[in-house]
Amino acid sequence: MAVNNQILAFMPDKYKNEVSSALAGFSVVFFDKMLDFIEGLSESDASAALIMSDEISSLSSAISHSANSDIPIIRIIANYTEEHIVNSIKLGFDECVSLSNIIRLPRAIRAFENSYSNKRKSSKIKIAGIKKELLEIFDLMPNMVLLKDADTFNYVYINRKGEELLGVSLPNIIGKNVFDLVPEKYAEIFHQKDLLTLKSTSPVLVEDTLLPTKRGEIKCFESVKILIQNGDKNKKYILEFSLDNTLRRSIKEELETTQSRFDKIFVTSPNILIIESLQTRTLMNANPAFEKLTGRSKSELIGKSFKDLGVWIDDYKIEEMLSAAIDTGKAHNHSVRLMDANGELKYYLISIDYLSIENKECMLYTGQDITDKSEGEIELKRLLQKQRNLAQLKNRFISLISHEFRTPLTTIMLSADLLKRYSQAWDDNEKTKHYDRIKQTILSMTKMLENVTILSKIESKEIDIFPERINLTQFAQAMAETAALNMPSANVIQVTNLNQNIEEIVSDENLLGLSLINVIYNAIKFSDSDKGIEIETEVKEKIANIKIKDSGKGIKEQDLPYVTQAFYRGDNTVNVPGYGLGLAITKKSIEMLGGTLYINSTQNLGTVVSISIPRYFL
């Protein structure tokens, strides 16, 4: 960016005088047409560009062209609103200034000049016989580009990607050769290739060459060197295109190490290891443990099918496992019977995993001999697997929480940023609005964490159940009053007992209460304040039924199958607070009580949630 006091501006005529007065120390060039303004962005080295428009297409176009010119772009806003600020940030403007605070505009531009003062531009580089347009193209390339004087072998150019990879700037490389930059043992390899390039009529390939950077890293490059000259054939250059292969080389070495380890494990493992071709259903490899088990050599096993070998007694189990492995990629820890070479019955714990070898679909069978294991040890393995499953369940909840935290955290960050930027100019009401927004968002996140913790405990069955006698109608009335107290509304909640003869049940008060409150909360949230809510209880000889009816906005038909999944919310709930956990908790709670949950709903007419549980939970 040039520090030349020139400002490019596009805005309505009625604001030009006001902006010119604020920028008295600058030379402001006003454009009447958007196309002329964009062309100016592409060709000028101005200190900054200003745009004042509410048309998204114009704003986006200006942002796009300013990115290619290194000119910071500032949006001028006539009527300040929070929405304008947010949209400007999203669009990518470097700064946003309102007319009411136009006095800060010169200070913002000077700050940009300081930050851009050391930034290089390829259009300023002069190389005999090389057009600046070509250098600009090199600067945009994703690979490193170097240019050497063919007579002196000194560097005359390095593109931006090269600066990034080598950790060296353009001014620090011009006039130097490779021996000035890296140790001789590395430099000599590159120099010999330069000499070869001078004699060659075709490009010279330099494969997997190591090169230390200024940051102390060792990079691996694959390069192509080309001899070029200008039209008069008076000046020659060596043009070098280099691809950073460091990651590929590292992956290759890791794969080779992994393959070596696998081969060693495959041969020395006491467990049987077999690789089967999924296409031909024949063995591709087998380890010594399987050779010993079957009494056959590898040459006798390769190319044979399990059917040919007759090794599995439980063929059907192996086929079921194979089908599961094809569908999911794995089938682990199934007890399978087989016959060894001496005709003795053996029990093996078999796992099957899908893998690809040289683009061929294969299955890896691993088997551990558990013939002599006690039932207690086998049970211990089952418990360990259960523990792993619970760990996976917790990880899934953590992943869901991370996803759902993004929006509230963004809200908090935005409000905090706005308070930092503009609180000095705001009155107390405006500040309080943002403080309250931050507080409410934090409370909402805390509530979500509590619900996720409850759902996690229910999922993993870590909640103890304590059955006790409950008068169902009175209990439902108490839950309705609790919900209305915690969520003030004008809705009238009517509780009706359909069977006066029987009212008492035996169940867990916590799980049942949690379920009822969640459903009643939803009925209140999604109903207009003048709409009533009905709760019906009915206790029969063996079953207790509860129905919660509302006349709210209802649930779309396509959303009904998914509303009891954690964090799922229908399209028509966008403007209603919540995280989609209430019905998920209710469903799991009712299932723990041995009951079922039914939901019937018609959009814009209302929802009926039916809960059916055993009258006596034992």
Image (cartoon, helix red, strand yellow):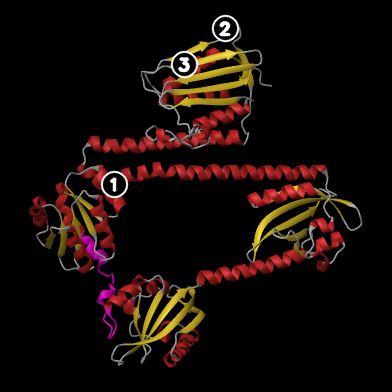
Which residue is pictured at 57% across the width and 37% down the height? 456
Residue ID for mark 3: 534
- The answer for how far apart the CA atoms under marks 2 and 3 are is 17 Å
Question: Which amino acid type corresponds to the residue marked 2 in the rendered image?
Answer: Gln
Instruction: Point out the frontmost of discs 1 and 3.
Output: 3
The x and y percentages for residue 336 are 80, 48
Alpha-carbon span between mark 1 and mark 3: 43 Å
Q: Where is residue 451? Give x, y as percent.
A: 50, 33
- In the visual, does 316 lie left or right of 340? left
Please give the name of the residue rendered at 30% of the width and 93% of the height, measured from the top-left corner: 234
Residue 500, numbered circle: 2
Location of the C terminus by quadrant is: top right
Q: Which residue was labeled with disc 1?
A: 86
- Image quadrant holding the N terminus, namely bottom left
Residue at the location (84% across, 58% down)? Answer: 309
Say whether residue 288 is magenta: no
Q: Which residues are magenta?
A: 109-131
